[in-house]
């Protein structure tokens, strides 16, 4: 049965998920939102294609781990007689000839460790969303596969005939596999791929070396940071919400969404978390992406999400060729939310950009011209701060004036005032400060419920959702504000289920949600810490860390009863929560120096 015990590898161009047997079960080409070359994760209970397995005859145990501070995966398989092999999986990523080298390619090295192991190689890619892509005639060292978006070639020093026929053979020396574009592989294959492995390892270790990690939970933070980096499409700077599509939020829910796109909101939270670790390259890449989005909008409507190259149209469809995760379809491609109205995006664009007006470490600090472009975004926030939208939970058939969206619009005005001050634009600073004050007054009047003593999630009701906790993170309310403490108490009482937090506890377009939303639990942990409940916060954080996969990661949702993970994986929201809480809760480095 498929599970989310999956190990991501990638190079910020392509990625793959490898299961607990060491098989590739998910991976798209030529980029994260492309056609799945490996699709068996969504192939139902007994998929016949969409995977790449290197099987050890009589395998009894499988052990997996990442090479330290990298997304390079090592899988050790041992059979019933003690014969064993090691498989090393990675996607090349390093600097070459002054340029970034991150090809559409997957590399595997298989080494004998003990005894006389016998292996078979089963490479069964798919194209056109689940259709088998059969191997075409190749040369003495390669096989070709015709994909829907690109032709691929497996170059190997393994016996090609035995690989093609999936026949078992004895592994007597290391073998190399390089699955990439259909072009000749120049140079010695084994030496070249081993060189790529060393260079890729060094590249990732150098990146991790620059992180300002907390002293506690370093392993968790580093793994989360690497996985967040894998969710960035470096060519454009876009950050996708997850590497997968259509993993349901709970069994049979049909809440199956495609998360392989760049949500303005999710990307904001990602760069916010990585900024706390000093990973400025992710911020700089994303700001370049955002500037192009803002330019294209010309001061007008900003969508909640875009494609990784800034594509505005992401029409949603279902792909019947794949039965879905554990057979729980539908499998969706595209996301209808791109058509929605979500006003919080205007705030998140400004919040993502504002650091660039202050941070002198950046290669490119923000300019007056950048500020002028952001003012057009601020104008939209001002115009729309008290107008109905679909909200951050992307309700498909309902609209309200959402307090979270209004607070993000307030933040847009407030931070524009800060940016103007940094640029010495005193008049514009006063202008945006006045607007921020007006929006604040509107929210405080419309969202506060005197009779129930808490902020409401909408202006026209008296309802709760976990996003109200974010009024603290936005600096709209302070930890000692009685309104925040009473709101936190109401939210915790209404939405907490044991160790986990729901988004909301009311029916939506698909009925009543059954799983908790992991980032909401992390929001609660932050709020507990801020209001002096440190012991509770640490206990809850330890509980969430215990729910990670063996790879050290989390998906979007968790079943409060069983602890099983659901939803797309790895989910940037959840990884962001891990990073933020570790930074907040950790003892300082000075305590051990």
Image: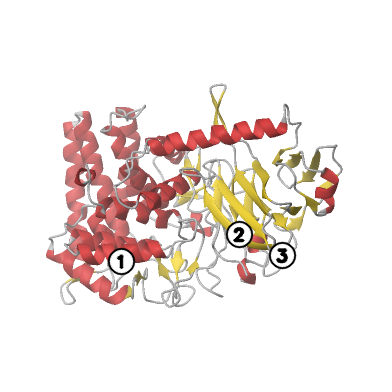
Residue closest to the eye, 297 or 124? 124
Describe residue 248's horizontal placement relative to residue 539 as left or right. Answer: right
Q: Give the residue displayed 36% in from the left and 49% down from the top.
A: 218
Residue 78 - label: none
Q: Give the residue displayed 43% in from the left and 36% down from the top.
A: 207
Residue 62 - label: 2
Name the quarter where the C terminus is drawn.
Answer: top left
Describe residue 435's horizontal placement relative to residue 2 as left or right. Answer: left
Q: Which residue is mark 1?
A: 540
Residue 67 in the image, given as x and y percentages of width and height: 51, 45
Q: Which marked residue is nearer to the observer: mark 3 or mark 1?
A: 1
Q: Are marks 2 and 3 in contact (CB under 8 Å)?
A: no
Residue closest to the eye, 444 or 74? 74
Name the quarter where the N terminus is drawn.
Answer: bottom right
Is tag 3's residue or tag 1's residue first in the polypeptide sequence? 3
Q: Quadrant of residue 421?
A: top left
Residue 252 in the image, given as x and y percentages of width and height: 56, 75
């Amino acid at each position: 049965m498929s599970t989310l015990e999956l190990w991501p590898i990638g190079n910020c161009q392509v990625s793959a998920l490898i299961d607990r047997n060491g098989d590739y079960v998910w991976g798209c080409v030529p980029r994260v939102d492309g056609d799945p070359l490996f699709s068996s994760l969504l192939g139902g209970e007994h998929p016949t294609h969409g995977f790449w397995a290197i099987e050890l005859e009589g395998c009894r145990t499988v052990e997996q781990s990442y090479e330290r501070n990298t997304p390079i995966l090592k899988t050790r398989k041992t059979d019933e007689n003690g014969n064993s092999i090691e498989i090393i999986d990675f996607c090349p990523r390093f600097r070459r000839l002054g340029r970034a080298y991150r090809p559409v390619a997957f590399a595997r090295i298989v080494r004998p460790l003990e005894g006389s192991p016998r292996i078979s190689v089963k490479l069964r890619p798919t194209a056109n969303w689940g259709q088998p892509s059969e191997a075409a005639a190749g040369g003495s060292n390669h096989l070709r596969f015709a994909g829907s978006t690109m032709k691929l070639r497996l170059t190997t020093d393994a016996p090609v005939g035995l690989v093609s026929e999936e026949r078992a053979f004895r592994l007597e020396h290391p073998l190399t596999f390089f699955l990439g574009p259909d072009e000749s592989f120049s140079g010695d294959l084994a030496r070249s791929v081993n060189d790529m492995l060393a260079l890729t390892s060094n590249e990732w270790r150098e990146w991790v070396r620059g992180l300002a990690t907390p002293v506690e939970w370093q392993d968790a933070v580093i793994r989360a940071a690497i996985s967040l980096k894998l969710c960035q499409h470096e060519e454009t700077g876009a950050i996708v919400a997850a590497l997968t599509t259509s993993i349901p939020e709970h069994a049979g829910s049909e809440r199956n969404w495609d998360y392989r796109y760049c949500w303005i909101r999710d990307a904001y939270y990602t760069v916010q978390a990585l900024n706390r670790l000093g990973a400025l390259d992710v911020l700089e890449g994303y700001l370049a992406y955002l500037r192009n989005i803002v330019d294209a909008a010309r001061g007008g409507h900003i969508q909640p999400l875009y494609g990784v190259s800034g594509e505005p149209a992401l029409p949603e469809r279902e792909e019947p060729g794949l039965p879905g995760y554990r057979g729980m379809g539908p499998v969706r491609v595209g996301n209808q939310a791109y058509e929605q109205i979500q006003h919080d995006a205007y705030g998140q664009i400004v919040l993502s950009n504002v650091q660039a007006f202050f941070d002198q470490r950046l290669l490119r600090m923000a300019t007056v011209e950048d500020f002028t472009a952001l003012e057009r975004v601020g104008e939209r926030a001002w115009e729309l701060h008290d107008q109905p939208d679909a909200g951050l939970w992307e309700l498909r058939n309902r609209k309200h004036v959402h307090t979270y969206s209004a607070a993000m619009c307030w933040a847009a005005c407030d931070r524009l005032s800060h940016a103007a001050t940094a640029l010495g634009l005193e008049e514009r600073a006063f202008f945006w400060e006045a607007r921020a004050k007006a929006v604040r007054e509107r929210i405080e009047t419309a969202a506060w419920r005197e009779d129930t003593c808490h902020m409401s999630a909408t202006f026209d009701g008296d309802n709760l959702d976990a996003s109200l906790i974010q009024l603290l993170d936005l600096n709209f309310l302070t930890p000692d504000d009685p309104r925040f403490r009473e709101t936190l108490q109401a939210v915790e009482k209404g939405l907490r289920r044991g160790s986990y937090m729901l988004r909301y506890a009311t029916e939506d377009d698909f009925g009543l949600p059954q799983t908790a939303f992991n980032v909401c639990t992390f929001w609660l942990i932050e709020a507990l810490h801020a209001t002096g409940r440190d012991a509770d916060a640490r206990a809850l954080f330890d509980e969430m860390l215990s729910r990670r996969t063996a790879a050290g990661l989390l998906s979007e949702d968790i079943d409060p009863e069983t602890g099983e993970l659901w939803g797309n994986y790895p989910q940037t929201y959840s990884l962001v929560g891990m990073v933020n809480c570790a930074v907040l809760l950790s003892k300082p480095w000075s305590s051990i120096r």
